[in-house]
Image (tube, helix red, strand yellow):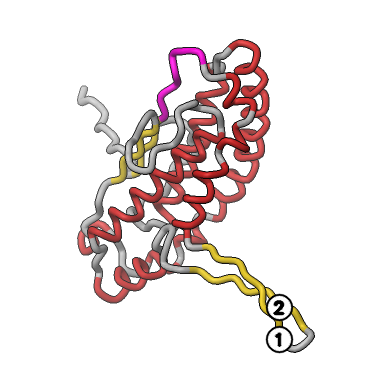
Amino acid sequence: MDAAPEVAQYPVRLSIDRPERELNRLTTFFRIIVAIPILIVLTSLSGAEWSTWEKGSDEAWRVGWTAGGILVLPVLLLILFRQKYPRWWFDWNVNFFRFETRVMAYLALMDDRYPSTDEDQGVHVEIDYPEAQRDLNRWLPLVKWLLAIPHYVVLFFLVAAAFAVVLIAWFAILFTGRYPAGLFDFVEGVFRWGARVQGYAFMLVTDRYPPFSLAP
């Protein structure tokens, strides 16, 4: 009897090392405040800029977006018209997403080491580089964001649950110095689910539909 064919790994993979040591209770207690500097760095890279101005007696709001953060529209256009995904655009998206994930994992109390701007630390994100002409349908990026709507719905509830789990873990770390393994695995799974959807619908690195799963 022939063995079942091995299923290829999904092109977007994420794992987070659970610290096998006591976590710093002090920085855990003040995590939101301690994280402010790195959140400012992350926001500046994402390109968000809020400002106001006055025109006569009326005050108006303006929001501008630079080319920072995840490159979506330029990648979409180049795949559509040239069937190319420039390697340096891919590298930017992957490295920005890694940095963003390290910051989010720090906020989720999964590590007490301050997020690095360039080192993986305990957060591992691997994304396979696509050969656009071979691996990507040139028209699919136009509708991927729409096809991913079921995932957005599920992730809304998963993220809400993860927020509650992180709050429980906050108390557990303050009293025991440890992040309970089951809670850690759940939050890691939510991060992994979100990373797959990000890779499919926004980074456009794969045409394989993300699985509805928290597992690796």
Does 136 appear above or below 168?
below
User: Could you tell me which residue is drawn at 51 percent across and 27 percent down?
Assistant: 110
The residue labelled by disc 1 is 55
- From the viewer's perspective, is the residue at label 2 or at label 1 nearer? 1
The quarter of the picture where the N terminus appears is top left
User: Could you tell me which residue is drawn at 35 percent across and 39 percent down?
Assistant: 125
Q: Is residue 20 magenta?
A: yes
* Quarter holding residue 29: top right
User: Could you tell me which residue is drawn at 30 percent across and 37 percent down?
Assistant: 9
**Label 1 environment density (alpha carbons within 10 Å; few <14, some 14–19, many ≥20):** few
Residue 182 horizontal side relative to residue 216, left or right: right
Q: Amino acid at mark 1?
A: Lys
Magenta stretch in the rendered image: 16-22
Q: CA distance from mark 2 to mark 1?
A: 8 Å
Residue 85 horizontal side relative to residue 154, left or right: left
The disc at residue 45 is none
Location of residue 194 in the rendering, given as x and y in whole percent from the top left corner: 49, 44
**Nearer the observer, 126 or 148:** 126
Location of residue 114 in the rendering, given as x and y in whole percent from the top left corner: 46, 33
Mark 2 / mark 1, whichever is N-terminal: 1
* Quarter holding residue 215: top left
Magenta span dominant secondary structure: loop
The quarter of the picture where the C terminus appears is top left
Secondary structure beneath label 1: strand
Location of residue 164 in the rendering, given as x and y in whole percent from the top left corner: 68, 31
The residue labelled by disc 2 is 60
Q: How many marks?
A: 2
> Could you tell me if the residues under marks 2 and 1 are in contact, i.e. CB atoms within 8 Å?
yes
Secondary structure beneath label 2: strand
**Label 2 environment density (alpha carbons within 10 Å; few <14, some 14–19, many ≥20):** few
Q: Is residue 196 magenta?
A: no
| Direction top: furthest residue | 176
